[in-house]
Amino acid sequence: MFKQLAFKQATKSTASTAQRGGNGVRRTLLAQAVVAGLFAPLLAQAQNSDAGQGASDLKQSASAQERLVTLALPAQPLDLALTRFADQAGLHLLYTTADVEGLQAPALNGQVSVTQALQTLLAGSGMSWQFSDARTVILRRAAAPATSLNLKPIEVSVASRTSTAISEIPGTVWVVDQTQLREQLQTGVSLKEAIGKLVPGLDLAPEGRSNYGQNMRGRSVLVMIDGVSQNSSRELSRQFDSISPFNVERVEVLSGASAIYGGGATGGIINIVTKKGEPGPARFETQVGASSGFNNSDDLSTRVAQSVSGGNERISGRLGVALEKNEAFYDGGGDQIFIDNTQTDLQYNRTIDLMGSLAMQFDEQQSLDLLAQYYDSGNDGNTAIYFPNLSYQKPSNLEDAELRGGYSTDLEPRTKRVLFNANYHHNDVLGQDFYLQASYRKEDNNFFPFPYYNTGKPTGSKGVYFAASQQNFEVTSLKALFAKTFSDFKLTYGVDLDRERFNAQQSVFDQRTSSESGGLDLDTVSKAPRYPSYRVDGLSGYAQLDWHATDNLTVSGGARRQQMDVEVSDFKGVPGGNNDYQVNLFNLGTIYDFKNGHQLWVNYGEGFDLPDPAKFYGKPGLSVDDNPLAGIKSRQVETGWRYSDSDWDAQAALYYIWSDKVITTDSATLTIDVVDKKSRDYGFEGALTRHFASSWEAGSTLHLVRSEEEDASGDWIKRDARYASLSKSTAFVGWKGDRSSARLQGNHAFTLKDDADHTIDGYTTFDLLGSHDTAFGTFSGGIQNLLDKQYSTVWGQRAKLFYSPTYGPEYLYDYQGRGRTYTLSWSMAY
C-alpha cells in the first residue's frame, strides 16, 4: 500500500475531475483488500474471545500483566503517579481517591512490565490490585469491599479555571483523552471532526477550514488552548484551524453557558490541553500516516510528525513538529468535491505546526510553564474553480464552472499564526495559590478569491471581478487568579485584561486577466480596507465560591463584571468613534454526590456574545457614536445526572437557554445587525457506554435540540436554518484486547426544517477503525464513510442559503461530504 500511495503522489494529475484512469477500480479493490487484511486478524481475535471465555480472559489478563511499558515517572504523590502511569501504560485504573491520599510514590523510569510497575508504585501503600480485563486494573485496600470502589476523579480546569474534580462540578463535563483522540484520528479526520463525533452536545463538524455553525447546545462555543482563548470578536470560525492533533494531550469540554470565562461561552467551552514534557531521559514520538479514497492519482493526504521530550525535576520540556499535506477530496459518487471559495478549503493544503513547551520548577512553591507555537496552514496547489462564461466588462455568468489546473494568485488562502503563553504559579502568596497567565496571539487569515458581479442591470451585464480579503488579529491578555481553600470552602477570584486589534484588507485582482483566464490567473491591482479597523479592550473581575455543605452536597456560585471598550477607525467616509458597555454575569449550581458512582446536579449560568464589530460597523453610513455595540446575554438552566463504575459510564442533562436579542445577516452585503427579539434553545444531551468483561464495549450519544425565536406577533417559530443546530446521535461497538483494538461507529445528523421552508437534510455515515501494537510501534487503520455515502454537508446546504442566487448558482456552494477514505498510520514512542 505504501508503494501504491507513493506512485500516486509522484504522478499527480491536474486534470478536471471527469478525467480518471481506467485503473481506478483496481486501486479501489486493492485498498479494500489491504484494509480487509488489516482488520481480519482483529475481528478474528474478537470473535475467538467469545469461545472459551474463561480461558481467554485468564490468558489476556496474564499477558497484560507481563506487557512491557516504557515509563518516565518522577517521585511524586501516589495519586498523581497513578494518573501518569495509566496514561503512559494505556491502562484504566479504578480506585478510591481517599485510599491513596497523602501517600508518596518512588521514581520509576525505563522499561518494565506492568506487574513490576504496579509493585513498585504501590509498595508500602497497603493497596492490592487485580485486572478486570486486559486494560482495566482495580486497586483496593485489602479490607475494602469491592462495592466501595469509585472511578478516580478526573480533574479539569475548564469549569472553574483551577483544577477541579468532575465529581464536584454542577454541570455537564466531557473529557476526550489521548486514547479516544488517537482512535478517531485513525480515520483521517480533523480535530474538530473527531471532537464532534465524541462530545454529544457539539454539532458534527464541517470538513473544510471553517467550523462555522459547529455550535454547542445551539449556541456559540469558546475554544481555548491551555486556557488561552482562540476566539475573537471578528467571528471567522477558524478556532480549530490552530493546532495539529499530534500536539494535543486531551480535550476538556463544559457544555452550556458559563459566567466564569466571559464572552463567547454561551453554548459551552472547549479547552484543548497540549502535550508537555515529563522529567526523565529523552523520549521520542514518531507518527506517519496517509489517507486516500483511491479515486484518482491526486486523491491523497499524508502526515508526518516527530517530538522529543525530557528533563529533570527542575526543568523539563517538549518540542514537536507536525506536517500534513492534502491533495484532492472526493465524494461518495467518485467526483471531486468543489473547492470552498467562501470560507476556504483544506484541499491542496499544506500545514506545519511547530510547538515547544518548557516547565520550570524553581522551588517547592514556584513554577513557570512556557509555550510557543508557530502554525501555518495554507493553499499549496494549482487547482481552482474555472468559470468558462466570463468576458471582460461584458455580459458574464458563473454557470458551467468546473475544477481545473493552472490556478495562480499572489494572495494564497491560509491561516498563519504565532502563540506565546506563560503561566506562573506560586502556592503561598498571602496564604493563597496565585496564578498569573500572560499570552500573545497574532493571526493572519487569507480568504479564497471570490467572484462578484460588477454593478449593472441586469446582473452580470458588466462582467465579473474577483477579490479576496486578508484579515489580521493581534490579541494580548493578562490574567491573575487567587485561590484559597478553607475547611469547607474554596474561593477563586481574579482579574482579566485583554486587548484585541483587528484590520482587514481587500485585494482586487486584475479584471481583464481574471476574465480571460476564467478566474484562474489572479494578480492584485488594488487594495482597500475590507472592514473598519478596530480595537477592543476588556477589563473583567470575577469570583467563584464552592461550598462543601456536607460530604455529599456541594454548592457553587460566582459572578463576573466585564467592561468592554470598542474603538473603531474611519471607514468609507464614515467617521470612527468609541463606545463601551458593561455586562454582569452570574452562575449558581449545586451537585449531590451519592458516593456510589451517582451524581445529580442543577445549575443556572449566564454567558454573552459580542457581535462582530467588523460586520456590524461595516454597513454603509453607520455612525459608531450613534450606534453603540452591546453584548448579547444568554441565560441557561440545566439539570443533569452522571454515573460511573467499572461497567458503566453515563451522563445526561436537560437544558433551556434563552436571550433577548438575535443577530441577523444581510445576504446581499453579508453584514450583520442586532435585533431585539427573544430566542431560546432547549434539549437533551446524553451519553451511555457499557464495558463488558469480555473486552467488548458498546455505547451511544444523543443530542436533541430545538432552536426557536419570536416572530413579530410574539409567537415562537423555528430559528432560521442557516443558524440553528441539527440534532444528532452516534453509536459504536468496540473491542480492546491486550495489543489490538477494533471499533465500528455510526454518526447521524437529523434533518432540520425551519418555518420559512428551508431544509437542511440529515445524513448517516459509518466508520471502521482498528489498531495493533507491536514491538516496532502501533499500526492503525481506518475507513471513514464506510458505505461511501454521498451527501451534502451541513455547511454546504447553509452556504447555498447564504450565497445563492446573489453570488451564483447553488451548485457552486453545495459542498459534498468526503466519500469512503482509507487511512493507514504508524506511531511509536521510544
Image: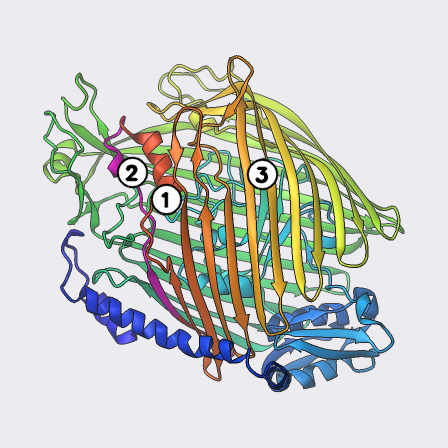
Whichever of callouts 1 and 2 sits on the residue coming sooner in the sequence is 1
Local crowd at mark 1 within 10 Å, few (<14), some, or many (≥20)? many
In this picture, which residue range is highlighted in magenta?
806-824
The amino acid pointed to by label 2 is Tyr
How many dots with numbers?
A: 3
Q: Which mark is residue 267?
A: 3
Alpha carbon separation for disc pair 1 and 2: 10 Å
Within 10 Å of disc 2 (Cα), the crowding (few <14, some 14-19, many 20+) is many
Location of residue 492 (image quadrant): top right
Q: Residue furthest front?
A: 51
CA gap, disc 3 and disc 1: 22 Å
Where 169 falls versus 264 (above or below)? below
Q: Residue at x 72, y 79 (%)?
A: 130
Mark 3, secondary structure of its residue: loop
User: Can you give x and y, in whole percent of width and height, for residue 147 in the image?
Assistant: 80, 67
Tell me the amino acid under the disc marked 3: Gly
Nearer the observer, 658 or 32? 32
Name the secondary structure under disc 2. Answer: loop
Residue 818 magenta-highlighted: yes
Residue 710 in view of the camera: yes
User: Which image quadrant for residue 60?
Assistant: bottom right
* Residue position marked by numbered label 1 in the rendering: 793
- Residue where numbered disc 2 is placed: 813
Number of the front mark, 1 or 2: 1
Above-or-below relation of 548 to 153: above
